[in-house]
Amino acid sequence: MPDPLIPVPPADVPPEGLAIGDAARAVGLSVDTLRYYEKEGLLLDPAPRDGGGRRRYGAHDLAWLAGLVMLRETGMSIADVRVMADLSRRAGTEAERLVVLERHRERVLAALERTRRHLAALDAKIASYRAVTAPDQEDPR
Amino acid sequence: MPDPLIPVPPADVPPEGLAIGDAARAVGLSVDTLRYYEKEGLLLDPAPRDGGGRRRYGAHDLAWLAGLVMLRETGMSIADVRVMADLSRRAGTEAERLVVLERHRERVLAALERTRRHLAALDAKIASYRAVTAPDQEDPR
DNA sequence: ATCCGACCTGGAGCGCGCTCCAGGTCAAGG
DNA sequence: CCTTGACCTGGAGCGCGCTCCAGGTCGGAT
């Protein structure tokens, strides 16, 4: 049983699992995106189906999805997420997963740093525009 | 004379300006991207040409480009950069530019915050994998 | 019984932001 | 003079990550 990327499920899940619409809302993705991710092999397993062939997302699936969203939101590509999923399906690959995650972490930190620097430049520009457009509140006397 | 988005030119520029290749290197874009940005109207003016019809980027142009890169790297869309460029071409639009920049700043801050939160989750996961794959260095006795 | 909305599949389409290509011009160095 | 390499244009192509569509099934409320 490969462990989820994130420890805690995002919501309390009924035993029969959530329908795709509810699951999508729970993790902040669209229904189409959920199906797309499944097609692309980003899930640990295709979501289990109920009697009528409809997907049912259990706590396990939702936890993985939450981790997936975390990776995507920090800018990991679909291809790299697939690598993580593939690794996570096989036992004994923990060290490799760690390597992937740590490399990703480095990239995230670098991106954060760049963004922070550019944000400072943005703030400077905003300040200069404020000075131009509102030369009133400046050093009131 | 619309002021540049960023006060300081990224390098010392000869009076005749830089050729597109050097300009690209200076601001960290590709030659194709520079031409693409010009086609898309993201520059204040099309880059001035020398006798042979080749582009020459002066300090002014490079300063604008540096600001453009700042906006792009903080995630502003091409369309919104174009809005900034259009505004910056017309005098008296300082307040509007400020609005655009401030809205953008809000989005950047929100993105930074989300990334920070997801980074924390990533760190937690990495820590848990470290515990699994290297249960040695833990509390050595 | 029937209606409605949520779900299903396979596959096409799309918006973004470049990136590359063909075919040509030009200028400087050997 | 000739070659080389950087530059030019217009336009096609592409990788990514969805998003949408047609045409159909299913289950619960009325």
Image (cartoon, coloured by chain):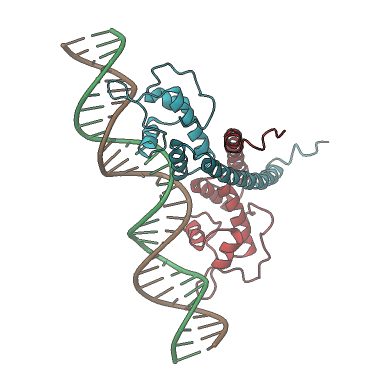
Chain colours: A red, B cyan, C green, D brown
Residue that appears at 70% across and 35% down:
A140
Q: Quadrant of the N terminus of chain A?
A: bottom right
Point out the image quarter for the C terminus of chain A. Answer: top right
Q: Is residue A22 left or right of residue D13?
A: right
* Residue at position x 38%, y 32% in the image: B45
Q: Of all residues shown, which one is farthest toward the front?
A: A141
Picture coordinates of residue C4, whole percent (x, y): 48, 79
Q: Which residue in the rendered view is the most extreme toward the right?
A: B141
**Whole-percent x, y for residue B129 in the image:** 67, 45
Seen from the viewer's position, the closer of residues A98 and B31 is B31
Location of residue D26 in the rendering, given as x and y in whole percent from the top left corner: 49, 78
A122 vs B25: above or below: below
Residue D25 in the image: x percent, y percent? 43, 77
Which quadrant of the structure image shows residue D2? top left
Q: Nearest the camera: A126 or A25?
A: A126
Q: Nearer the viewer, residue A140 or C14?
A: A140
Instruction: Report the residue at 62% width, 35% height from top.
Output: A135
Residue B35: quarter of image: top left
Q: Is residue B41 left or right of residue A117?
A: left
Residue B52 to residue A91: above or below: above
- Note whether residue A113 is visible: no
Q: Quadrant of residue B119?
A: top right
With D7 as the anchor, is A62 left or right in this view? right
Rendered view: B50 above or below B115: above
